[in-house]
Image (cartoon, rainbow, N blue to C red):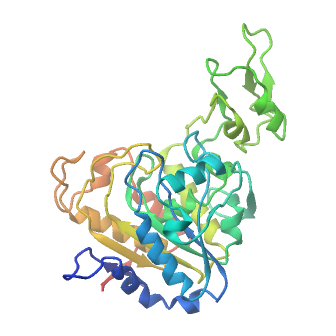
């Protein structure tokens, strides 16, 4: 059975607001039936790394918040801390970055909640018998939310070909331990040149994995791989940024893990999740970078669906039907695969096929233009 995916383009009549199209797009979903009054509904999005300008405009989120408040529910904007060191690696700098990028309460009308806590270690452990993983570490406040509206900016990604709804919840709904589980199969390592031997990592590690290196010319630490439980706490607390992820996971298992994490996030949200994807400013790489490149295709429109697999397939198909923009990073005609042109070594269909296999949704969809 085909999943309905609703679509609005970015064309408007004279004197009309483009924001009104969001109201039109959400009408088929009967939001008061989906989210009970006064429930806590998380609006899951990506606030953008500092310096990146490809993330979604806050005005779109404000309109969505207004629509949700009219039900009425209590919406909050949420995301999780990053695995790497950057401008979103703990709740303090993450909220500062979100506000810097325009997602302040005064602008969007909803509070910000970093879903995995101060340093990314606040999670619910979930057990699911899936082909690759059996246990999952889902950000606690996303787990506890009564409902989710997942708002994604569709773009390229070097490990999954593209980032859409599945990545937004699969990677973005995981606490730091879950992110590390998806990206790496081995313990973090200590950069010898950066480590100053302060011992902060040892102080915070719950299992004593960081150890002093005996006989070293300068005082420094190492990670005992046999003791390490992969929580990523040491990465978060190191003041020198000396503890680094070993990004050794290959694209195929990474995508399968990401799809399974999306299933874990949604495992207790049946009928209480909705997906909105903006196929606009389709940048070649993720919004996690502190910069963004020229879009690869023109701005196409906005999609909405109950099915994260269908909406990702529809977004990929819309992009691939387009010619690449003059001056873009790639040159590809209508019908050519833009994401394989960007990342020839990545078969992006793996994430969709695996998501479909584990029952997350279907790649078979009906595109309904409104």
Q: Which corner quadrant holds the N terminus?
A: bottom left
Camera-side residue: 364 or 241?
Answer: 241
- Asked if residue 344 is positioned above or below residue 217 in the image, the reply reads below
Task: Tell me the residue at 62%/23% (across/down).
Answer: 191
Q: How many marks?
A: 0
Q: Quadrant of residue 259?
A: bottom right
- Asked if residue 107 is positioned above or below residue 369 in the image, the reply reads above
- Asked if residue 310 is positioned above or below residue 249 in the image, the reply reads below
Q: Do we see residue 102 in this rendering?
A: yes
| Side of 259 where 332 appears, left or right | left
Task: Tell me the residue at 68%/57% (across/down).
Answer: 116
Q: Residue 160: horizontal and vertical position, in percent?
A: 44, 52
Task: Tell me the residue at 56%/60% (across/down).
Answer: 170
| Side of 197 where 40 appears, left or right | left
Q: Which corner quadrant holds the C terminus?
A: bottom left
Task: Tell me the residue at 56%/91% (across/down).
Answer: 32
Q: Residue 308: horizontal and vertical position, in percent?
A: 48, 71
Q: Residue 246: horizontal and vertical position, in percent?
A: 59, 34
Camera-side residue: 22 or 256?
Answer: 22
Furthest residue toward front:
106
Q: Do we see residue 309 in this rendering?
A: no
| Side of 126 where 4 appears, left or right | left
Q: Residue 118: horizontal and vertical position, in percent?
A: 71, 51
| Side of 22 where 11 appears, left or right | left
């Amino acid at each position: 059975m085909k999943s309905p995916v609703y679509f609005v383009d970015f064309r408007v009549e004279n004197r009309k607001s483009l924001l009104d199209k969001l109201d039109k797009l959400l009408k088929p979903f009967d939001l008061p039936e989906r989210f009970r009054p006064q429930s806590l509904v998380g609006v899951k999005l990506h606030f953008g790394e500092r310096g990146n300008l490809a993330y979604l405009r806050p005005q779109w989120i404000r309109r969505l918040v207004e629509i949700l408040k009219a039900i009425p529910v209590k919406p909050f904007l949420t995301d999780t801390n990053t695995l790497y060191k950057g401008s979103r690696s703990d709740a303090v700098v993450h909220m500062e970055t979100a506000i810097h990028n325009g997602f302040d309460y005064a602008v969007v009308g909803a509070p910000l909640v970093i879903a995995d806590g101060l340093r990314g270690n606040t999670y619910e452990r979930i057990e699911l018998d899936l082909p690759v993983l059996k246990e999952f570490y889902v950000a606690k406040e996303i787990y506890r939310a009564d409902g989710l509206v997942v708002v994604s900016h569709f773009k390229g990604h070097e490990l999954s070909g593209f980032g859409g709804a599945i990545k937004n919840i699969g990677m973005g709904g995981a606490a730091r331990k879950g992110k590390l589980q998806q990206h790496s199969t081995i313990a973090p390592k200590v950069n010898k040149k950066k480590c100053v031997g302060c011992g902060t990592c040892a102080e915070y590690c719950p299992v004593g994995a960081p150890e002093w290196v005996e006989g070293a010319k300068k005082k420094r630490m190492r990670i005992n791989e046999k003791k390490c439980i992969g929580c990523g706490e040491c990465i978060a607390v190191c003041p020198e940024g000396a503890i680094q992820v070993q990004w050794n996971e290959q694209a195929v298992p990474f995508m399968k893990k990401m799809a399974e994490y999306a299933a874990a996030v949604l495992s207790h949200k049946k009928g209480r999740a909705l997906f909105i994807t903006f196929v606009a400013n389709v940048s070649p790489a993720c919004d996690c970078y502190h910069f963004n490149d020229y879009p690869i295709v023109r701005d196409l429109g906005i999609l909405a669906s109950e099915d994260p697999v269908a909406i990702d397939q529809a977004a990929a198909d819309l992009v691939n039907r387009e010619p690449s923009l003059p001056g873009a990073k790639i040159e590809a005609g209508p019908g050519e695969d833009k994401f394989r042109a960007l990342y020839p070594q990545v078969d992006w269909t793996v994430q969709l096929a695996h998501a479909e296999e584990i029952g997350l949704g279907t790649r078979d969809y009906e595109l309904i233009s409104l």
